[in-house]
Image (cartoon, rainbow, N blue to C red):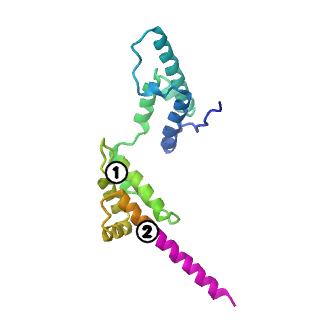
Amino acid sequence: MATLHIKPLDGADGYLRWKESVPLRLHTLGVAHVLSDDPPAGGPEEAKKWARDDALCRGHILAALSDHLLPVYVRHGTGRALWRAVARTYEPDSLSWELKFEELEFRDDETLLERVARAEALAFAASRSPMVSDELVAYKVCTKLPEVAEDAIIHGDETTMDGVWRSAQGMERVRNGMLARVIRLEREDMMP
């Protein structure tokens, strides 16, 4: 079986991809359960299997760390302890996500739908609580994308992310239609 290549974690910039890739590998190997389950209270065979799974899990996490991070985390004796230590270092707290959301700027080459997706992801992360309401995320996105909020309010859909997405998709269709017309008119003007 081919193993999934994971770019070694080398700092905060690569953490999001890393924290999604490592569990995929661990699930593929059948050892991810040690990150969330407690060791079994059964007999020696279950304990032996658990210890093996934990060692494999820990080893794969360590292998997915860069050379300069390995000495920082190698002291953690279990896969779960190691996973939690890395998360404590790189998981943003809600305040830093709030700041990231407030400072979010969009590139000129991003489509409106890409902007909505980025804003939604950050708004959701900024509102990390056990039960994040769709209305709160929609509100945060609308504060970042006033043109979408205005369109959503006009259509009465501003209170949910589905409504925000419907508005953004409609606006993108209109924009694409306008661009197509401009291109067609420019081509007609160039014809002899």
Q: Residues within 10 Å of mark 2 (few under 14, many from 20)?
A: some
| Amino acid type assigned to the residue bearing label 2 in the image | Gly
Find residue 86 and report its horizontal and vertical position in percent: 45, 33
Q: Element at badge 1?
A: helix
Q: Is residue 64 placed above or below 110 in the rendered structure?
A: above
Q: Which corner quadrant of the image does residue 103 belong to?
A: bottom left
Q: Front-most of 123 and 8? A: 123
Identified at 38% across, 66% down, the residue is 148
Q: Mark 2 sits on what residue?
A: 170
Q: Element at badge 2?
A: helix
Find residue 21 and report its horizontal and vertical position in percent: 53, 38
Q: Main secondary structure of the magenta part?
A: helix
Identify the magenta region.
172-192
Q: Residues within 10 Å of mark 1 (few under 14, many from 20)?
A: some
Find residue 69 and report its horizontal and vertical position in percent: 52, 32
Q: Mark 1 sits on what residue?
A: 98
Q: Is residue 174 placed above or below 11 in the rendered structure?
A: below
| Amino acid type assigned to the residue bearing label 1 in the image | Glu
Determine whether, in the image, residue 7 is placed left or right of residue 174: right
Residue 164 is a magenta residue: no
